[in-house]
Amino acid sequence: MKLLSLKINDSFSSLFDGFELNFRNNFENVDSEDWSQFHPFCFVGLNGSGKSNVLEALANIFYHIEGCVNVNQPDNFKEFFSVKESSPNAYELKYYITPKTVDIYSIEKMVKVSIYKQINQAPTMEIAEYPFDGASSTQIIPIIADKEKKIPAGAKIYLPDLIIGYSSGENEVLSIPFLKTRLLHFDEYVEDLKRNIKYNEPESNLLYIDYEMSQAVLLSNFIFQDADVLEPLDTELGIKEIKRFRMNLNHHLIGEHQILAQYNDKISAFKNCATTYFEDEENLTLDFWITEVSKKAFKKNFKSIIDLFQAFQILYTLNYRSVNNDIKSEVYQSKGYYTDGKMATPSPREKVFYFLDFYIEKQINDKGEIKKLLLKNLSDGEQQFLHTIGICLMLKGKSALLLLDEPETHFNPDWRSKFISTLKTSLEKSGSNNLRRDILITSHSPFIISDCYPNKVIIFERDKEPKKAEELPINTYGTSVNLLTTRIFGKKETIGKFSLDKIDKFRKEFYSGGNPDEIKARLNEELGDSIEKLIFIKEMFSKQ
């Protein structure tokens, strides 16, 4: 998919009524841009300027649209869901996408999708076929499902396969629609269980990557991907392979029903891949040593990398068995902040599924020494790197919108400078078609900004319309990080305020009659090299 524009016609968080963001020109006005190239959008600006709120608005919009088009919705969800009310409550969203019914993904096969919602009215969808210039006929697509007859709305085929959210800073507002979706998936599973209907996959497409889900991402990649696709994880992190892991499944009951009963096909598939397993009335424990033989077994028993990942995703979802209906109702009603801490973290015994002994093989120094480590032994930065790169490696064959909120928070400067190029390399190696997805990144890192084109860097200021860097004009691509820090964040100083204050103390001492030679000697003794120090030294001796 390729985003075209978003307009908010109702206030949403810090986004004002009338807020508008144009991602790219209408297709008929594009002369040189090649949509098949890798060009992520980078949202930049000071804290509170609204850049993360755009990700939150998009997540909420797609959550509401999914609620309109889907049919498998439990009673406690339907009680608090209204097709006429959403947050934001009025908007216009336009994007290009290839319908799910079309196998070939090319510009000529795309349609232009326009979704409109007015305050307290159900959204509407229009599509225009290629070349999207108004000469082709525009069609109104039904967006409200026939939930009684279990018939999804026609708009379903014009939605992305995946809306993926990730926040290194634990952005609660971004996670709200994804948390609601997880609870919805659980209730959807339980209703099929009680009616003895085989459960295949979640109906909604929102997916949030947190620590637990990232384990499934990493495992799925190392089992299904070729070595050259995984090369970035080796080069940057030194991760060579997954050696072994254990899956623990507890046979909990939902009423009179064994909770895993509806998932026996996938449980059998895992047993077929296990090196060994033990099962009794209370739990099932499966041990896996990852070898070429076990990888072949996984590829025989699971259709694709997404099929394996989704199996883990559903098992994780079943851990929400411990969330009572009152808490679920509170989450479903939430339109603003919701503290995930209100939901108690279940103990291992209370969970349905969790990993144990998840060991990786990692090169730990420049001498090539390799050590087996638990996944949790990786640093925060290493785990963030795994999250974001691992997600992208799985996207082959899927249309997706990636909402990455400050993915580089725990990266060292070297990884920040390599992040965009590594992301590009990973996607190319996985064979993913760039027409299938858009990537939105919020960032404060000038290293990431300098690897993004000026028509893809969008600069935010509080209570103002965002502007592309090329409009200002700022040529971000390949520009020095110092210049970008000055022009975008208004930070002219190259050193911290504490050391700047020290230079100011020396300046006051000089203008109070201090000896410049003595002050210079103390400056060089106490402070390292900086432009600010050199300017002050020059200032002192020019006054003599």
Image (cartoon, helix red, strand yellow):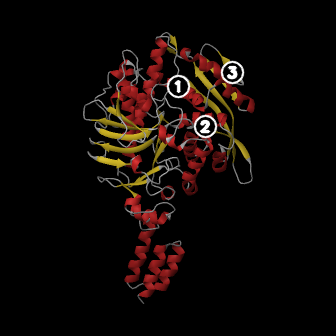
Residue occupied by mark 2: 218
In-front residue for pair 75/65:
65
Hey, what amino acid is under mark 1?
Answer: Ile
Which numbered disc flags the more N-terminal residue, 2 or 3? 2
Please tell me which residue is depicted at 59% across the width and 40% down the height of the picture.
393
Hey, what amino acid is under mark 3?
Answer: Asn
Please tell me which residue is depicted at 47% across the width and 15% down the height of the picture.
192
Q: How packed is label 1: few (under 14 Cα within 10 Å), some, or many (20 or more)?
A: many
Cα gap from disc 1 to disc 3, whole angstroms: 19 Å
Residue occupied by mark 3: 272
Q: Measured from the top left, where is residue 358 in percent x and y?
A: 64, 34
Q: Quadrant for residue 93, please give it.
A: top left
Cα gap from disc 1 to disc 2, whole angstroms: 16 Å
Q: Which mark is residue 314?
A: 1
Q: Measured from the top left, where is residue 35 in percent x and y?
A: 49, 47
Q: Measured from the top left, where is residue 108 in percent x and y?
A: 48, 40
Which numbered disc flags the more N-terminal residue, 1 or 3? 3
